[in-house]
Amino acid sequence: MQSSNPVFSRSEEFNGRGQLRTDPSQWQIDLNGEPTTYGSQPVTDQRRMTVDTVVEKTAITLGLVAISAAVTWFLIGDITASNENIQKAWMFAMGGALIGFVLSMVNSFKKIISPALVMAYAVAEGAFVGAFSKVIASYVGDQTIVFQAVLATIVAFAATLGAYKFFDIQVTAKFRKVVLISMFAFLGVMVVNLILSLTGVLESGGLRGMGTLGLLVSVVAVVLAVFMLILDFDYVEQGVRAGLPERESWRAAFGLTVTLVWLYLELLRILAILRGDD
């Protein structure tokens, strides 16, 4: 799930605490989780990150996710028709998840962002999204659930952005710390749950099952994803204000893509669970 955004917290400028325009290759992070800057030097690149460049790069990454997901969807075929197609679905899901996780870690902690690696992450994540969506659509017996989840994600994104702008939400250091701690705690619990489920200690997926408990966990995940979107908006705003170089738009696009994919997957799960209870 490749769904966390620690990438932004590495930057002093993204957090609005920097006064100097520094080379992102010099960003570090201390043991307290607070970003620091070493070897500060003026940035000579005259092209700066703007909201437009972030939107442009995010459109590219999300487009790659969508294309990869669509290709994966059609390559898998009808998973109810044969065991071979079921195996294809698992292969794409596990392969996409593993490669996407590795690339997300590389992109998160890489000092100088690589557009190629960000796009590679989008393709890998798209394969996972396509396979997961195929499995869920087959589970509920209705492919339109995928479009419903996409629409719900767009609405959630627009509503969060609208609330952030119109209600002038202020992201304080305390709010940021609480959200990040909560998010990492949630991911830690999910990792333990996955291990226990794979080893047979927990049945039916444990906390990630398709029952009432699974529904509640996905609702919590959606709330956390919305809070992460708020942090993303604030981080991008701070980065633009600090005059970061244009290449950092890819870092912002990567962070937004991670959050939006996570949000989509959780909304898809919620819709599937509600359909299953009908």
Image (cartoon, helix red, strand yellow):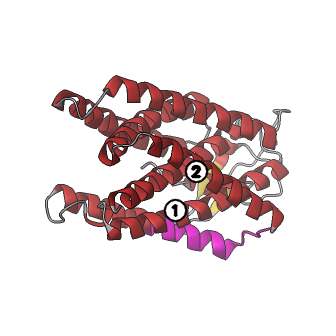
Label 1: how many residues lie within 10 Å, few (<14), some (14-19) or many (20+)?
many
Residue hosting label 2: 153
Comparing 180 with 168, the one in front is 168
Query: In this view of the protein, can residue 49 be seen by the observer?
Result: no
Q: Position of residue 162 (x, y in %)?
A: 76, 59
Comparing 175 with 11, the one in front is 175
- Is 181 a magenta residue? yes
Query: If you read the primary sequence from the N terminus, does the residue marked by circle 2 or circle 1 appear first?
Result: 2
Name the side, left or right, on which 66 lies relative to 19: left
Residue hosting label 1: 222
Which stretch is magenta?
Answer: 168-185
- Is 73 a magenta residue? no
The Cα–Cα distance between marks 2 and 1, rounded to whole angstroms, is: 10 Å
Residue at x-position 49% and y-position 35%: 121
Residue at x-position 79% and y-position 43%: 51
Q: Position of residue 30 (x, y in %)?
A: 57, 62
